[in-house]
């Protein structure tokens, strides 16, 4: 439970959570639902998973832009990589380990630093 609380404390942590959910939904859609629809003539999973993935996809894009602005990410250096990752299977898992996890750890360190405890 501590891990979930830690992730939900920061905007980057919430982006990491959404990126996992979006990545899993994309993989399920591409590897399970679409083959079932076309090879087994069973479109139900696409009809249910498709809209859920769409909502997660849009949420991921909105949160990525929000985090990019908040963290002062340079679009050409970081933000576009995160945005492109959500259309590539396994892409969100890659950017989590290379961009989002280090950013989240830096955020947590900043929150627990002595300077953050002083009143302004």
Image (spheres, grey):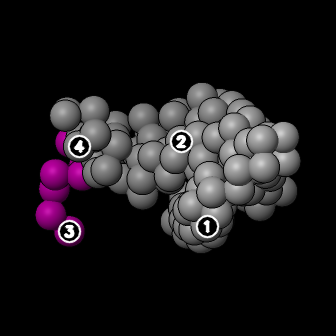
Q: Quadrant of residue 100?
A: top right
Q: Which residue is mark 1?
A: 51
Whole-percent x, y for residue 27 in the image: 68, 39
Q: Is residue 1 left or right of residue 26?
A: left
- Number of other residues with Cα within 10 Å of mark 4, as a class: few under 14, some 14 to 19, many 20 or more: few
Ranked by sequence position, the earlier of labels 1 and 2 is 2
Whether tag 3 and tag 2 are in contact, CB under 8 A, the answer is no
How far apart marks 4 and 2 lie (CA) works out to: 16 Å
- Number of other residues with Cα within 10 Å of mark 1, as a class: few under 14, some 14 to 19, many 20 or more: few
Q: Of the numbered discs in the image, which one, if any, rests on residue 61?
A: none
Quadrant showing the N terminus: top left
How far apart marks 4 and 1 lie (CA) works out to: 28 Å
Task: Find out whether residue 119 is within the magenta segment.
Answer: yes
Pair 4/2: label in front: 2
Is 54 drawn above or below residue 3 in the view shown? below
Pair 3/4: label in front: 4
Whether tag 3 and tag 4 are in contact, CB under 8 A, the answer is no
Q: What residue range appears in magenta?
A: 114-120
- Which element type, helix, strand or loop, lies under badge 3? loop
Q: Of the numbered discs in the image, which one, if any, rests on residue 5?
A: 4
Whole-percent x, y for residue 101 in the image: 51, 34
Q: Which residue is mark 2?
A: 20
- Which element type, helix, strand or loop, lies under badge 2? helix
Q: Is residue 80 left or right of residue 28?
A: right
Ranked by sequence position, the earlier of labels 3 and 2 is 2
Res. 12 visible in picture: no
What residue is drawn where x is 45% and y is 46%? 17
Is 78 drawn above or below residue 1 in the view shown? below
Whole-percent x, y for residue 7 in the image: 34, 43
């Amino acid at each position: 439970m501590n891990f979930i609380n830690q992730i939900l404390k920061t905007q980057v942590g919430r982006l990491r959570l959404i990126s996992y959910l979006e990545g899993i939904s994309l993989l399920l859609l591409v590897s399970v639902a679409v083959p079932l629809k076309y090879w087994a003539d069973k479109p139900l999973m696409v009809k249910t998973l498709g809209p859920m993935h769409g909502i997660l996809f849009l949420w991921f894009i909105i949160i990525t832009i929000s985090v990019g602005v908040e963290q002062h990410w340079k679009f050409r250096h970081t933000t576009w990589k995160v945005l492109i990752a959500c259309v590539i299977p396994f892409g969100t898992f890659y950017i989590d380990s290379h961009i989002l996890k280090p950013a989240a750890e830096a955020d947590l360190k900043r929150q627990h630093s002595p300077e953050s405890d002083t009143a302004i």
